[in-house]
Image (cartoon, rainbow, N blue to C red):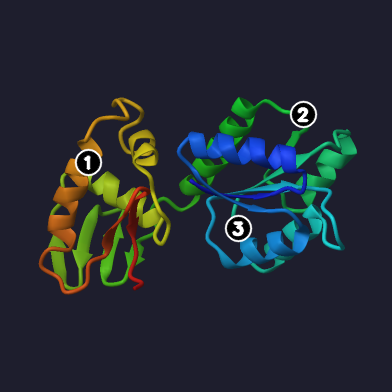
Amino acid sequence: MKILLVEDNQRVSQFVIKGLQESGHTADHAGNGRDGMFLAASEPYDVIIMDRMLPGDIDGLAIIEVLRKAGKRTPILILSALAEVDDRIRGLRSGGDDYLTKPFAFGELLARLDALHRRAQAINPETPLIVGDLALDPLTRKVTRGTRPIALQPREFKLLEYLMRHAGQVVTRTMLLENVWDYHFDPQTNVVDVHISKLRQKIDAEFERPLLRTVRNAGYMVTAGE
C-alpha cells in the first residue's frame, strides 16, 4: 500500500514510518496540517493516517472535512490521544473511516490499515481499470491493449489487476507476494520476477510504449506517464 501519515510528533512518526516500510509499504509523511492537506489532495494514496491535533491553523478533522467535500474517498484512519466517546464520534462523523487512540500497538494499526484497504477495494471491484491504452475488466476478465485482446493466465490476470489498481505507484515484491500470492511464498523466491517477465511479454513486447516499468531497488509500476 501507499500510505500517507500526517503526524507532528517526531517519535511517533519515526516509529510508524519505520514499521510501515519494514512491512513492505510505501509511506510519505507530513508534519503539519498544510503539508498534509497538500499531499492528501494531490497524491494517490491507498490509506491516510491522520493525527487530530496538528500545529498551525489546520487540524486533522478540518483536513478530512475538506477532502470529503472535494470528493476524495481515500480511507482515513484517525490517530489521536483524544479517547473519549464524544471525540471518537466526532472524528468518524467528520469523515474518518476508523479511529485508533494513542498509545497503540503497531500490529493493531497495521491490521486496521489492511482492513480499510480491503474494504475500499471491495466497493467497486467490477469497475474497468484503464491505464493508457491498456484496459482490464474484472467482471468479464478481459484484457485489451488498444483493439488487441490479451490472453492471461489466472495468476497473470491477478498480478496485472493489482498493478493497475495501483497505477502510478511503486509496488514492491513484498506487496505482490502478500496480495497476489497470499503470503505462501518465501520473500527470497523469484516467482514475482518470473511472472512480471511473462506479463511484460504479453502487454508490452509488441507495443511502442512500455507500460510495465521496473523501478530499480524498489519494485514495479504500471503507468502511462513518461
Helix, strand or loop status at disc 1? helix
Residue 129 placement: quadrant: bottom left
Mark pair 3, 1: CA separation: 29 Å
**Kind of residue at badge 3:** Arg
Return the disc, 1 or 2, that comes first in the chain's sequence.
2
Classify 10 Å Cα crowding around label 1: few (below 14), some (14-19), many (20 and above).
Answer: few
First in residue order: circle 3 vs circle 1: 3
| Amino acid bearing label 1 | Arg
Does residue 65 appear to the left or right of 14 in the view shown? right
The residue beneath circle 2 is 103
Residue drawn at 21 percent across, 72 percent down:
209
> Residue at left 59%, top 55%?
74
> Residue shown at 21%/36% (left/top)?
191
Foreground label between 1 and 2: 2
Marks 3/2: CA–CA distance: 27 Å
Answer with left or right where residue 8 lies relative to residue 127: right
Q: Which residue is mark 3?
A: 73
Q: Which residue is mark 1?
A: 155
**Front in this rendered view, residue 209 or 215:** 215
At mark 2, the secondary structure is loop
Q: Does residue 115 show up? A: no
Query: Which residue is depicted at the point 24% across and 52% down?
Result: 141
Comparing 163 with 172, the one in front is 172
Name which residue type carries label 2: Pro
Q: Residue 196: which disc?
A: none
